[in-house]
Image: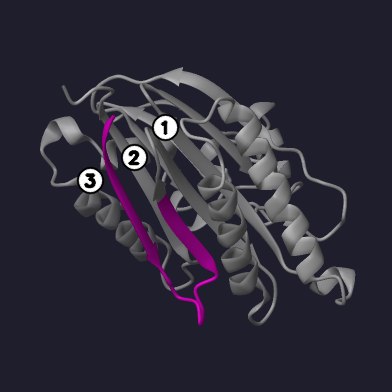
Amino acid sequence: MQVEVAKFSHIGNRAENQDMVEVLIGDHTVLGIVIDGMGGHSAGAEAARVSVATIAERFRNSQQPLPFPERFLVRAVAEAHDALVQLGSDDHLDDRPRATCALCLVQGDVAYWAHVGDSRIYHLRGGKLLQRTRDHTHVEMLLQEGLIEESEIASHPMRSYVDQCLGGEASRPTVSVVGPMQLERDDIVLACSDGVWGGARDHRLAGAIDYEQDQGTLEEQLEALVNGAVTANSPSSDNASAVAIRWVDSDPN
């Protein structure tokens, strides 16, 4: 399997970066992880660190290629949630570390993804959006029901409220899983925190990463996307983080 991968995280206009990104490469399997930590002081940063460490451990200890990718994603997210619940077990409910997450997994010539909260995954082809995840938020529900426009999300008074997250209550959150999705050469699977997509409508975000237009390497395009989001949202930009996987070929021979 041939892929190109990239990751980038920007602190934005915040005092601390509570996002964390990682790309793990296994035997014919690649996993991209984006965690957006939530919580006061350093709780969000610790939530992100623990979540990534937990998911990475599950990945490294799993048989590969993964026999049941969807099951792996659900279990990895559940274990990350349980780890955050344990981390905050001595805290008041309102102060417990929480996080949103987006995981994108490419194995062979297919992709799978899972998310909780408002961290997103985009499937891009030739600078166009094929599909994206639907946020676990009230404003996403309003958008899907046609009650607001996409351009209204960023300024909506309930913009920052998520319905599902890792951590907090002991009960496990709803995990949205998609796949298998067939990949074509130069398809991009992009996972990002809300600091990236919050300042750009879907079609503009999709056009920012287009391998067919010779706009630079995947790493260069991803950094330009994240830096552009920070600039667009300044002077109150959130942490902005993303990982991208470009599928090239299932067999290098």
Vertical comparison of 209 with 15: above or below: above
Magenta segment: does it hold 11? yes
Q: Residue at x 86, y 57 (%)?
A: 169
- Residue 105, percent across and down? 47, 36
The 10 Å Cα crowd at callout 3, few under 14, some 14 to 19, many 20 or more, is many
| Amino acid on which the number 2 mark rests in the picture | Ile
Image quadrant in which the N terminus is located: top left
Mark 1 or mark 3, which is nearer the start of the sequence? 1
In the image, 199 versus 122, the foreground residue is 122
Q: Is residue 99 left or right of residue 7?
A: right
Mark 2 or mark 3, which is nearer the start of the sequence? 3
Say how many tags the image has: 3
Magenta segment: does it hold 76? no
Vertical comparison of 13 with 100: above or below: below
The 10 Å Cα crowd at callout 2, few under 14, some 14 to 19, many 20 or more, is many
Which numbered disc, 1 or 2, marks the residue closer to the eye? 1
The 10 Å Cα crowd at callout 1, few under 14, some 14 to 19, many 20 or more, is many
Rendered image: mark on residue 245: 2
Quadrant of res 35: bottom right
| Amino acid on which the number 3 mark rests in the picture | Leu
Rendered image: mark on residue 106: 1
| Amino acid on which the number 1 mark rests in the picture | Val
The answer to whether mark 3 and mark 1 are in CB contact below 8 A is no
View extreme (left): residue: 214
The answer to whether mark 1 and mark 2 are in CB contact below 8 A is yes
At mark 2, the secondary structure is: strand
Residue labelled with disc 3:
218
Cα–Cα gap, marks 1 and 2: 8 Å
Quadrant of res 215: top left
- Residue 6 in view here: yes
